[in-house]
Each structure stands twice: as structure tokens, then as C-alpha cells.
């Protein structure tokens, strides 16, 4: 699995975007890459940097705006307006028009959240899986210093099994554990939480971390199902955005399995929600409620009237649910881990590359029991 992921990453580094179209147009280049990565079934290298001296084909660049991207880079597309971040769909080897390379570096803090709510709305389990991704388009590979908030501590007791001692005291951001890319130097990490590294070309994870310390979940989810007469029942699902109004969640999807004998569902959708749709998937007896956007602080409710083909003999709450939710929130992170600054060693007085630091939170397993 690791090899397949690395091959995908190297291919994306070279082509800029990983899609059917880009693979088709760069067939010869991809063939050449695979030829160098694996010899006689043995892996030789998956480093974009090392491969540069062996690969001679130039990538044919595919226009990213026309292609639905595969993978996390696509979450930074917002409608037709491209956040500067979508420049991560550039190839690390192709030059810009005019033959010059734009000096820039991208740092993404991507967090995947898992939360389970009890039927009464209490949090039963909560966990964050985070990664700091870096993609560098800097020539000459200058040294980079990346500083995290100083109140980060690692390991429940302030010290971790890795020996990254905590000299700062009990921090407000407690990571259960973390690991770093092999190019990261941790000499000053204990003192001031800075990481120094010489980034290789292409995309890589600077740091992966896990956190089970209590945090405020971005959404509260409450779901209720109750009988409403013979062969009828009513479902009420309420979601409340608990993050600041400056952030907006997008591509929200709420799903709930219904009893197997549900024959018809009618929805009562509240006005005012942006781009919302409710649907009953008859084939797998599932209710789906999608919203395009939810602004922080907003609350939305869906009511559904169910009609059954037979009487329910058991407990309805055992035959329906749980409610699961998918979402993406750009420029928000639940762990409060932050990149305080990104320092690049200067080659000259005029050298000032672009730096992009972006945050994104996604649902991994976000479930409310009935």
C-alpha cells in the first residue's frame, strides 16, 4: 500500500495533477517513471529528487480547471474561484510559461476527525488524525524553519515514548504521538517547537500526529425517530455548526439507514439553507441530506415522514441509524495546532518566495447514535 501511495505521489509530482486525462496524455513519461522506480520487481527509489536525473521526458501539462482532480488537492477548489492553493496542481519539473519557475512553497495542515455521539448528544469517542503536508517549488533547496505553537506537548504525561521531552510545561495542545519525515531536524524542537528541514522536490508529509485530547467538535448532531401512527414514523435530524462564523463548511452529506420495510419518505426541508437536497435511496433504504455550505454558528433541521409497508414490531431506534456525516472545512482546524511562521534561508536580498499555509478539516468517521 505504501509503494502504491508513493507511486501515485511521484506521478502527481511530475504530472501536476492525477487524473485519467493526465495519465493518458503522459503515458510515455509514466512508463519511464515506473521503469526507474521498480527494477525486476524490486523497488529502487520513490524520491522525486533522485528520479530527476534519470527521467528525460517532459510532462504534457493538463489544464486543472477542466479536470475533476483526484485527492485532497481538489478540496481547495471553491466554485470557479480558485484559492491560490490550487497551484499545487503544477508539475515540479515543468517550467512556467516564459521558462521561469515561480518560487513558492505550500504547507497544508490536514486533519481528519472521528467523533461518536451518544443518543443523548454526549461525546463518546473523539480523535484527530493530522498531517502537515509540504510541497516545494523552490530552486536550490534552501533550508526551511517551520515553527509550531509553543504550547504543543507530546504524550499524555508531557513526555512521549519518542523522547521529545516537554520542557514547556503542560501544553494546551496535547498530541498523543507523532512522527516526522526523515529530512526533519529536531535539534530545537524541545526548546521552541521549531522544525528545520531541507525540503526535497515534490510532496511529502513533514509530520503526522494523533490527538485524543478533548476538543470541540465542529458539528453537533442530534437525531430522533418516533412512531407517528399506524405504519408511519417521523425522523428529525438537527445539525449545528460549532465553529466561528468566519469559517464555512462545504460539501456536507448526512446519511441515515432507515428500517428495511420503509416504502415512502416525504421531506420537510427548512428554507434558508444553501443548496440543500434530501433524498430517499430506495435500493439500500437510506436517507441522504446534502448541503452545499454551512456557515459557522448556523443550525439546520431536516424533518422526514416515513411510511412503512408493514407494522414495526421492535424498537424503531434499533432498526434505524446511526446518522453519519461527511464534510470539509477549509481554513479551520479543531486541534488548534498552528504553523506560527515559515522561514526560508535567503540566497540574496531580493529572494522572497511565496509561502502558502492552509488548514483543512475533514470528517473521517462522524457518527451520532440513535
Image (tube, rainbow, N blue to C red):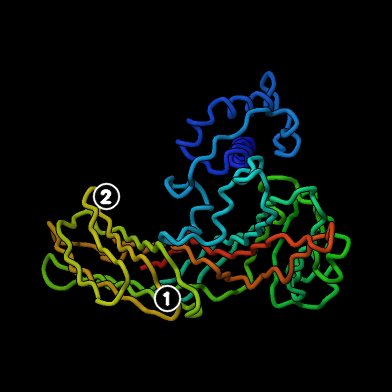
As displayed, is residue 310 above or below residue 302?
Answer: above
As displayed, is residue 147 above or below residue 347?
Answer: below
Q: Please give the name of the residue rendered at 68% of the width and 28% of the height, measured from the top-left corner.
A: 56
Query: Can you tell which mark lies on residue 252?
Result: none
- Distance (Cα) linking label 1 and label 2: 31 Å
Residue 318 placement: quadrant: bottom left
As displayed, is residue 196 above or below residue 181?
Answer: below
Q: Which residue is the site of mark 2?
A: 284
Q: Nearer the viewer, mark 1 or mark 2?
A: 1
Residue 91: percent from the left, percent from the top? 61, 43
Q: Please give the name of the residue rendered at 63% of the width and 40% of the height, measured from the top-left corner.
A: 94
Q: Nearer the viewer, residue 291 or 98?
A: 98
> Residue furthest toward the front?
98
Residue 267: percent from the left, percent from the top? 20, 68
User: Crowdedness of circle 2 by 10 Å Cα count: few (<14), some, many (20+)?
Assistant: few
Give the side of residue 175 with respect to residue 228, left or right: right
As displayed, is residue 225 above or below residue 22?
Answer: below
Residue 323 placement: quadrant: bottom left
> Counting residues from the N terminus, which is met first, the one under dot 1 or under dot 2?
2
Q: Which residue is the site of mark 1?
A: 295
User: Crowdedness of circle 1 by 10 Å Cα count: few (<14), some, many (20+)?
Assistant: many
Q: Quadrant of the C terminus?
A: bottom left
Secondary structure beneath label 1 = strand
Q: Please give the name of the residue rendered at 44% of the width and 71% of the height, measured from the top-left corner.
A: 118
Amino acid at each position: 500500500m505504501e509503494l502504491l501511495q508513493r507511486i501515485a505521489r511521484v506521478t502527481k509530482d511530475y504530472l501536476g495533477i492525477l487524473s485519467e486525462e493526465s495519465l493518458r496524455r503522459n503515458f510515455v513519461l509514466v512508463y519511464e517513471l515506473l521503469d526507474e522506480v521498480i527494477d525486476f520487481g524490486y523497488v529502487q527509489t520513490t524520491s522525486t529528487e533522485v528520479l530527476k536525473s534519470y527521467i528525460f521526458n517532459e510532462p504534457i501539462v493538463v489544464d486543472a480547471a477542466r479536470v475533476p482532480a483526484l485527492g485532497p488537492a481538489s478540496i481547495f477548489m471553491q466554485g470557479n474561484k480558485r484559492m491560490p492553493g490550487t497551484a499545487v496542481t503544477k508539475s515540479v519539473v515543468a517550467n512556467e510559461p516564459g521558462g521561469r519557475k515561480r518560487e513558492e512553497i505550500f504547507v497544508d495542515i490536514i486533519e481528519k476527525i472521528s467523533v461518536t455521539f451518544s443518543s443523548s448528544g454526549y461525546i463518546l469517542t473523539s480523535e484527530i488524525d493530522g498531517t502537515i503536508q509540504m510541497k516545494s517549488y523552490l530552486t536550490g533547496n534552501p533550508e526551511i524553519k517551520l515553527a509550531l505553537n509553543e504550547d504543543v506537548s507530546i504524550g499524555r504525561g508531557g513526555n512521549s515514548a519518542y523522547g521529545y521531552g516537554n520542557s514547556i510545561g503542560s501544553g494546551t495542545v496535547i498530541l498523543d504521538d507523532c512522527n516526522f519525515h526523515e529530512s526533519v531536524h529536531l535539534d530545537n524542537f524541545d526548546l521552541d517547537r521549531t522544525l528545520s528541514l531541507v525540503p526535497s522536490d515534490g510532496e511529502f508529509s513533514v509530520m503526522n500526529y494523533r490527538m485524543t485530547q478533548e476538543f470541540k467538535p465542529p458539528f453537533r448532531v442530534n437525531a430522533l425517530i418516533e412512531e407517528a401512527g399506524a405504519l408511519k414514523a417521523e425522523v428529525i435530524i438537527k445539525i449545528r455548526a460549532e465553529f466561528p462564523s468566519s469559517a464555512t463548511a462545504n460539501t456536507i452529506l448526512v446519511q441515515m439507514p432507515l428500517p428495511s420495510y420503509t416504502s415512502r419518505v416525504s421531506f420537510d426541508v427548512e428554507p434558508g439553507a444553501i443548496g440543500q437536497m434530501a433524498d430517499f435511496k430506495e435500493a439500500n433504504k437510506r436517507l441522504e441530506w446534502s448541503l452545499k455550505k454551512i456557515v459557522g454558528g448556523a443550525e439546520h433541521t431536516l424533518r422526514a415522514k416515513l411510511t412503512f409497508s408493514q407494522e414495526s414490531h421492535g424498537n424503531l431506534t434499533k432498526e434505524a441509524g446511526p446518522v453519519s456525516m461527511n464534510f470539509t472545512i477549509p481554513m479551520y482546524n479543531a486541534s488548534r495546532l498552528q504553523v506560527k511562521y515559515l522561514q526560508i534561508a535567503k540566497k540574496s536580498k531580493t529572494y522572497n518566495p511565496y509561502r502558502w499555509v492552509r488548514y483543512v478539516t475533514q470528517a473521517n468517521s462522524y457518527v451520532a447514535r440513535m
